[in-house]
Image (cartoon, grey):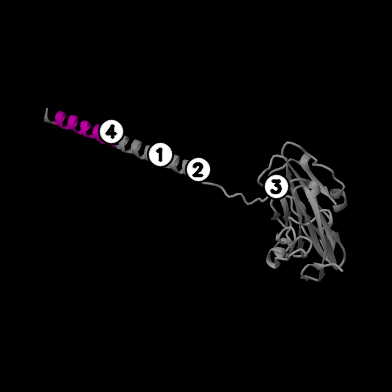
Amino acid sequence: MKGEKSKLILVYILMILVIILVVALTFNILNKTGKNKDQSSYANETPTVDINPYPNISKECTFDLTLASYHAMTGPGCKGGYSRYNLTDIKLGDKTLEAVIIYSDKNGPKSGLYINKTKVINKVDNLINIRLGIFDNKLFILNKNNNEANVLVYNSLGENVYNLKDTLENLKLSEPNFQTISDEKISTKTIDPNSFAFAANNFTFKTRLIVNNQIINGSNYIVNFTGEDFEDPIIKG
């Protein structure tokens, strides 16, 4: 009898140990699963960094164009979103600049002009308001968006070497023909956007002021340059 009771007690003890082991193993598995779920959830919620400066645009709305072909355009190649224009012949010496114009008729945040993947113009109201030319081994960009008229110049390394807007803001030039009417200084907003002319060593423009819907003509100005050295705008004699 005593032997049978001992065996029975041993069986109960073994059963209890098995139950404890099963419970411990189950708890361990559930705990690991919970951690994996938490880590997976955290990974999904972690913000990603968008390293591509350009928006994703379909092949049908991406165009490889020469400067001449781009300047011949009168409107966007696609409507209802983004369209991309890769300018293929911006060659300065032995280097080719990556010049890309992103247009959006829905004011997309990534629209603008990019040089070597850096956005240099933040808004493109109309494709015909961006004009480009190569003079003296430099890329000249005439930007007529935002009711202004600015000139940006880039060298073969994609570095900005001239900004007409910054120059005028620093100089605070007075226009002789405006002084009896307004003390407004010459700025990119008082330049006739259609008056620019570019040559090998200079470019010219004309000022104008609009008062009560009347256009008051100013003077003709010239900016001379040699290499990357640009002189201050002066009245053209």
- Amino acid residing under circle 1: Gly
Classed neighbour count for the residue bearing mark 1: other residues with Cα under 10 Å, few (<14), some (14–19), many (≥20): few
Horizontal relation, residue 32 to residue 118: left or right? left
Residue 216 in the image: state x and y as whole percent.
80, 55
Q: Are marks 1 and 3 in contact (CB under 8 Å)?
A: no
| Residue 16 versus residue 234 in the image, above or below | above
Q: Please tell me which residue lies in front, 87 or 228.
A: 228
Residue located beneath label 3 in the image:
111
User: Tag 1 or tag 4, which sits nearer the N-term?
Assistant: 4
| SS for dot 2 | helix
Can I make out residue 94 in this image? no
Disc 2 residue crowd, few under 14, some 14–19, many 20+, Cα 10 Å: few
45 or 2: nearer the viewer: 45
The disc at residue 45 is 2
Q: CA distance from mark 1 to mark 3?
A: 44 Å
Per the model, the C-alpha gap separating discs 2 and 1 is 17 Å
Q: Residues within 10 Å of mark 3 (few under 14, many from 20)?
A: many
Q: Earlier in the sequence, mark 2 or mark 3?
A: 2
- Magenta-drawn stretch, dominant element (helix, strand or loop): helix
How far across and down, in percent of the image, does residue 59 sit?
76, 41
Instruction: State the quadrant of the N terminus.
Output: top left
> What's the amino acid at mark 4?
Ile
For the residues bearing labels 4 and 2, Cβ distance under 8 angstroms: no
Give, as a single range, the part of the protein colored magenta: 3-20
Report the amino acid beneath label 3.
Ser
Mark 1 / mark 3, whichever is N-terminal: 1
Which residue is denoted by mark 4 in the rendering?
A: 19
Q: Mark 1, mark 3: which one is toward the viewer?
A: 3
> Upstream in the sequence, badge 4 or badge 2?
4
Distance of label 2 from label 3 (alpha carbons): 28 Å
- Which corner quadrant holds the C terminus? bottom right
